[in-house]
Amino acid sequence: MSDDLDFLPSHEPTDIPGFHAYSDQVGLAPGETFRIRVSNDGPVTCTILRYDGPSVASATPIETLPPISAHLYPLHRGSYVYVERGIAVCAPFTVEVWFRTIADAPLSGLIGQTGFCLALTQDNRPIFRFGGSADRVEVHGPPLPLKTWHHVVGFFDGARIALYIDGRLAGSARTPPGVSLPAEPLRLGALPDDQGRTTALFTGDLCAPGLYAGLFSARRIASRFWNKTLRRAPHALGYWKFDALQGRPYRDVSGNGRHGRPVNYPIRMVPGPRRTTDSDWSTYDPTSDPDFGHAIRLMADAVVDCRWPVAAEWQAPVDLRSGQYGVCVTDGAGASRHVHFVVRPSRPSAKLMCLSTTGTRIAYNFKPFDNPAFDYGAYYPHPNYPMMMGEMLGVRRPATGDEWETYTVDFELPFYAWLDAKDLAYDLYTEWDVEAEPALMDRYTAVAFAGHSEYWTRARFERLQAFVRRGGHVLSMSGNTAYWRVSLDLENGVMEVRKHSRVPMPATPTPSTTCDPLANAAHWHQLDHLPGATMREAGWPESSLLGVMSNGWTDPPMPGPRAGYRVLTPDHPVFHTPRPIHTVFPFAQDAAGYETDISVRTMLERCGGPKRPQYPTRDGHAIPDLSVSFDAGLTVLARAVLPKSVVLDYDSNWFEGEMAGEMTLWERPGCGIVFCAGSVLSSDVLNRDENFSNLILNVLNRMGVKTKFEW
């Protein structure tokens, strides 16, 4: 892995007010140690909780740890590339870089070390600084437009420095005689301060930075700009490629070994100045595009890891039962913060595997500090540059108890409480456990997930497909299921999601996405080098695994509009065996709401099929069409409708209308059973609706998962 969140050179700190807590673990096994990290001006207490009820609020305390003497800790914000081996500068010398600024700043570095830099001042004005503190000279350029690629070159010929911007001379200045500069660490996208700390961080894109022993002629500079030349020139002292596909992504290809190390996870797989239009999103592959360019996107306030020390540890008992747990951290004023985690089984023994919605929980933690100066995320664009640029979401961030982050836990807790009440044995895992141990689900008869299982990786999708093909069963008590495609860095605890849309305004793009030109052709992931956006757009349509797809949403989530289902197939055996079920309307009252799924056939009948090309399906199946059979064995058991909702069509365009949710049962020869409840809120009513409870018991019985009284 190219990124290492333990690596942090001397870096200007940002003080962060308030009370915050987190862990670098999303789960652990009995006997392992859970680490808690806290920033607070004063002591705190930590209480370990088991979430054995239908919500976080109904948790049961199981242990209180000794009081902790907590301290305030800063953040070290901003992504850049650190090059330990800088250069000793002497004439002749040239520095070059392509850049595209997203947000203006008082001072931000493009490339530099102590003694020289190419940087930007207020109003996006390029500047070339050269010399020591006593003999420094500068050349300034004019203000440049944001969100546009620019080319800057600075050179030193022994008597003067010059600055070229977009192929033209912007100015020059004489230098004192005999100037030479010692080798110091170099930074791409930042500058050193007088203490050697990283500061003046850049927000924008960098491409093809290079240092050269020699001078570029005016003709060469103009030619490299007008031809958008990204190849290194002769006599390179350092030339960095951000190619994410082969070798080190921040490697120096000059042959001088000045390889860079990333800090705070720069965003890769960003096209450079030769590719500024969007791709067709059905055949485009940047790995075979000679014009892609491989730029990096840097953010001056990037935080994927708070880097705070461990404040307290708790060793999970060796006999601790698998399930959802948390730590309630409380300060002296009575304020509290919850840190959620999963305890997986020490010895898998159940037939039913449950997967906690880890990805959605991390994505919905988009207000980790509850402070607009520090918060942004998958649903919360930064106020200074309100666009989704590709998010690297770290688990090592706090959660303030924002309702959206809490909802992701409360959506699924009723399902586990119901399983416990019905004496149905289950083993709970994080979704990331399946990534770390590919054969994990092979031990189980059925796999279930509840609540909001929205963020899926390619690996999890394909492993569940293989699981079903060899006879394993899937129970989805979810809605908006398998919608966004993500990829993971398990070592650093980072999830990547690229919420870009290809629908130019004024059309209605996929919700929570942007169509900004800065997102053009940047929808591929740097972690697995595959297309991003939604699962279906990327070639993994959720319908090929589940038989359903997302149909829309209502708001607010928990207390918002709800509906019951109308049973469409009352004679189906699942409504009669082994428990008879009353199928009168409304069935499973209030189980449909917030976000729902419907069968593909219903989607095609209501909204039509896809209107724009998509990447070919990875399993080779054709895009569903009503003129051919594509869902043999799939039964729509029941349907709910919610008027005055936001409805999604096959292409994820949205409009106001009547949202539907459907319960489906898919039974194919030689494959396992797939049941979908069709709503994020489906589990919420299980514990108070005996009729619906009995249906899910019948479904599980059909899958070979039975209560101890049924064996």
Image (cartoon, rainbow, N blue to C red):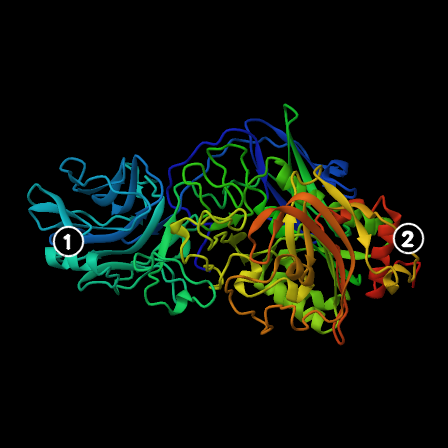
Circle 1 — which element? strand
Q: Picture coordinates of residue 647 (x, y %)?
A: 62, 49
Q: Nearer the viewer, residue 593 or 118?
A: 593
Compared to residue 542, the image places residue 196 above or below, namely: above
Q: Residue at x 46, y 33 (%)?
A: 373
Task: Decide: few, some or many residues near mark 1? Use Cα within 10 Å; few <14, some 14-19, many ≥20.
Answer: many
The residue closer to the viewer here, 417 or 14, is 417
Question: Label 1 is placed on what type of residue?
Answer: Phe
The correct choice, above or below, for 591 with respect to 18 in the image is: below
x and y percent of residue 457 in the render? 58, 60
On the image, the x and y values in percent for residue 29 come to 69, 54
**Residue 133 figure quarter:** top left
Q: Which mark is residue 269?
A: none
Q: Which residue is mark 1?
A: 93
Reading the image, the residue beneath label 2 is 582
Q: Type of residue at label 2?
A: His
Front one among 301 and 360: 360
Q: Residues within 10 Å of mark 2 (few under 14, many from 20)?
A: some
Which quadrant of the structure image shows residue 63?
top right
**Residue 601 visible to an observer of this rendering:** yes
Q: Which of the marked residues, 2 or 1, is nearer the chain's N terminus? A: 1
